[in-house]
Image: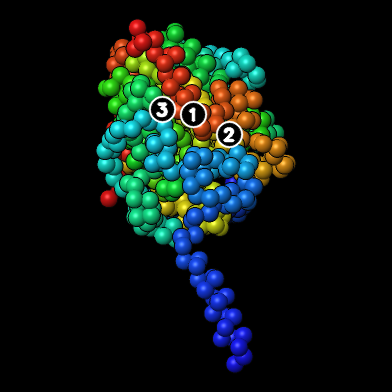
């Protein structure tokens, strides 16, 4: 069963009708085929129309779509010989951040991904993609390992944010995030970050201070969730859609503000309608972003990365 | 009309009328509710003379308490105000203007250079009174400027933090100040200069999760609230009561996140001592 979002209702109805007609084995099959073709055309048209002008809040829902490919799907689709590595060597392994070695297009790389999980059981196991300090410390350890062996780092970011918990604070959540950002910035190897779904605040930037930051067409990236922002600034979480608009959290807004480097187009109707196509598109974009960085030595790579971030925020929308 | 109205009332009125003296002569301690005479409070560096509570201080007080006489403020680079053209119940540009009028500051960060007990230093101070000390492009740019100035002057960098976190009204632009401020701290470290963070009440969110937690030395004022997530958010997530003293300076010290809790009256001496202990090059 396909999961439809609220605003996809007209599409759901059309696709439901198509399914119904297909199941019917009427004697005048030719007429049905025509009707099905007409409806398919109509629903594709509807899908295109809807997805070409998604609001920020609709994109937020698409970015959080339960069927949207998750970090583990990107790793499975793009990385061969993936060999998970675990733990921060101090406290625990954090299942909210996947990490390990593998090959991307034949090249040995370090991979990191915040993993939300895709059903109730795995969501709980991955803590809904909300990492604890040990997760960010694992990330830092693996980025440093990548640096020592000259391996590029690929990250796939999909997180509501860092986990807000008592233990997380006691173990230095803020310090762990700060060090992870620092590790990205200091890496003597290329760091390519892709925001595949939800780029939630500090928990996202911890893995996304890279040479190239890619963002899927309907992904979001924000300093605070629209719900959180609404409850603080509007004192009403129900104003989330208004807040989403105001926060300028879409890939298109971030590109316009020059805070990300590239937008990766999604299949028609969103990545959840064709995971393979979405994953392939990300693979191609990562390869294109990585290629020119491979010839740079550590010092120029770092300098270029610093300059990129230092130049940010001097522009504005208008 | 009785004689009461004519004689006693005016007298009573005149008693109350004497209250036209500024009502900030006496301050109430937010911790113990006791009243403290303003001059006593000034002499005590805004520490409650009854309970020792460290009250919030403003930027000029911080600078005066930390730097020797004759320090200079630097002009910080201008950044685009309101990059998102943000508006909630009010326009962000109006909120900014209001904050500027109320504080007579441009934004929530001030950078000065001078000396601490004779040793030169760059000191950056965050102003909680300016939109909760939130970090937007101006604060981030200021931290970068402070880092650059420290390198240029071959001086240690000291940052007094006080912040509610990111400035939501600048959206992702404010988020990007996290890596930008981290770069500033690296510039100072690359030059082998000490970077000391003094966390004051409150230091939370994106500020804590970036430059504030990357000091060579972390000091904090007694009782200061320091953390990543807000107490309310944590309570809603974990659905249990937060432990006593949670996210306070002493708690962080106990958990190994800060080096020492230092009383305000001892802070300048502590900074001077750490700088001189770390800067063997300069002493030689």
Could you tell me how far apart the alpha carbons at marks 2 and 3 are, in whole angstroms?
A: 18 Å
Could you tell me how far apart the alpha carbons at marks 1 and 2 are, in whole angstroms?
A: 11 Å
Single out the residue that lies furthest toward the bottom.
B1
- The disc at residue B267 is 1
Position of the C terminus of chain B, as image quadrant, is top left
Helix, strand or loop under label 2: loop
Residue at the spot 29% in from the left edge and 45% down from the top edge: B80
Subunit ID for the residue under disc 2: B
Q: From this viewpoint, is residue B216 visible?
A: yes
- Labelled pair 1, 2 in contact (Cβ < 8 Å): no
In this view, the residue in front, A251 or A265, is: A251
Counting other residues with Cα less than 10 Å from the Cα at mark 1, is it few (<14), some (14-19), or many (20 or more)? some
Residue at the spot 60% in from the left edge and 88% down from the top edge: B3
Counting other residues with Cα less than 10 Å from the Cα at mark 2, is it few (<14), some (14-19), or many (20 or more)? many
Residue A1, image quadrant: top right
- x and y, in percent, of residue A232 in the image: 53, 52
Subunit ID for the residue under disc 3: B
Task: Quickly name the residue at label 3.
Answer: B158
Tell me which label, 3 or 1, sits earlier in the chain: 3
- The disc at residue B222 is 2
- x and y, in percent, of residue A276 in the image: 49, 31
- The disc at residue A282 is none
Q: From this viewpoint, is residue A185 visible?
A: no
């Amino acid at each position: 069963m396909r999961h439809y979002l609220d605003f996809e209702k007209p599409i759901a109805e059309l696709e439901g009708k198509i399914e119904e007609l297909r199941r019917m084995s009427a004697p005048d099959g030719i007429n049905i085929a025509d009707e099905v073709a007409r409806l398919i055309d109509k629903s594709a048209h509807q899908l295109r129309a809807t997805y070409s002008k998604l609001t920020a809040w609709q994109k937020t829902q698409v970015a959080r779509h339960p069927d949207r490919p998750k970090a583990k799907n990107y790793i499975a689709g793009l990385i061969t010989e993936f060999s998970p590595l675990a733990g921060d060597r101090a406290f625990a392994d954090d299942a909210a951040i996947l990490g390990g070695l593998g090959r991307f297009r034949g090249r040995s790389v370090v991979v990191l991904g915040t993993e939300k999980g895709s059903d109730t059981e795995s969501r709980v196991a991955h803590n809904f993609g909300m990492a604890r300090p040990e997760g960010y410390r694992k990330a830092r350890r693996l980025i440093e390992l990548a640096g020592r062996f000259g391996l590029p780092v690929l990250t796939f970011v999909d997180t509501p944010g860092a986990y807000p918990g008592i233990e997380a604070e006691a173990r230095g959540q803020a310090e762990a995030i700060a060090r992870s950002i620092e590790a990205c910035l200091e890496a003597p190897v290329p760091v390519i970050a892709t925001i595949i779904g939800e780029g939630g605040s500090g928990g996202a930037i911890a893995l996304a201070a890279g040479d190239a930051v890619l963002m899927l067409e309907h992904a979001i990236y924000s300093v605070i969730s629209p719900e959180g922002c609404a409850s603080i600034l509007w004192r009403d979480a129900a104003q989330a859609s208004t807040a989403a608009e105001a926060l300028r959290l879409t890939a298109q807004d971030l590109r316009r503000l020059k805070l990300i480097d590239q937008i990766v187009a999604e299949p028609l109707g969103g990545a959840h309608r064709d995971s393979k196509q979405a994953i392939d598109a990300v693979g191609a974009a990562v390869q294109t972003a990585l290629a020119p960085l491979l010839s740079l030595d550590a010092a120029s790579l770092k300098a270029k990365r610093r300059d990129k971030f230092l130049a940010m925020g001097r522009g504005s929308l208008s | 009309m009785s004689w009461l109205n004519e004689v006693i009332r005016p007298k009573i009125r005149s008693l109350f009328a004497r209250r036209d003296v500024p009502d900030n002569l006496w301050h109430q301690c937010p911790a113990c509710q006791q009243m403290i005479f303003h001059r006593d409070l000034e002499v005590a560096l805004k520490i409650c003379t009854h309970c020792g509570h460290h009250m919030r201080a403003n930027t000029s007080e911080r600078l005066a308490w930390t730097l020797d006489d004759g320090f200079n403020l630097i002009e910080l680079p201008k950044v685009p105000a309101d990059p998102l053209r943000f508006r909630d119940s009010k326009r962000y540009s109006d909120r900014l203007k209001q904050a500027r009028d109320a504080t007579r500051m441009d934004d929530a960060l001030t950078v000065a250079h001078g000396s601490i007990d004779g040793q030169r230093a760059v000191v950056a101070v965050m102003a909680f009174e300016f939109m909760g000390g939130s970090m937007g492009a101006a604060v981030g740019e200021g931290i970068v400027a402070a880092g650059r100035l420290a390198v240029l002057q071959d001086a240690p960098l000291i940052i007094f933090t006080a912040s509610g976190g990111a400035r939501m009204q600048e959206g992702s632009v404010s988020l990007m100040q996290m890596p930008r401020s981290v770069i500033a701290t690296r510039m100072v470290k690359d030059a082998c200069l000490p970077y000391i963070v003094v966390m004051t009440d409150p230091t939370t969110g994106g500020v804590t999760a970036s430059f504030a937690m990357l000091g060579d030395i972390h000091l904090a004022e007694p009782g200061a609230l320091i953390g990543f997530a807000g107490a309310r958010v944590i309570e809603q997530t974990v659905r249990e009561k937060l432990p006593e003293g949670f996210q306070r300076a002493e708690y962080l010290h106990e958990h190994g996140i800060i080096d020492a809790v230092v009383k305000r009256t001892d802070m300048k001496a502590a900074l001077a001592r750490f700088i001189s202990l770390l800067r063997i090059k300069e002493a030689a």
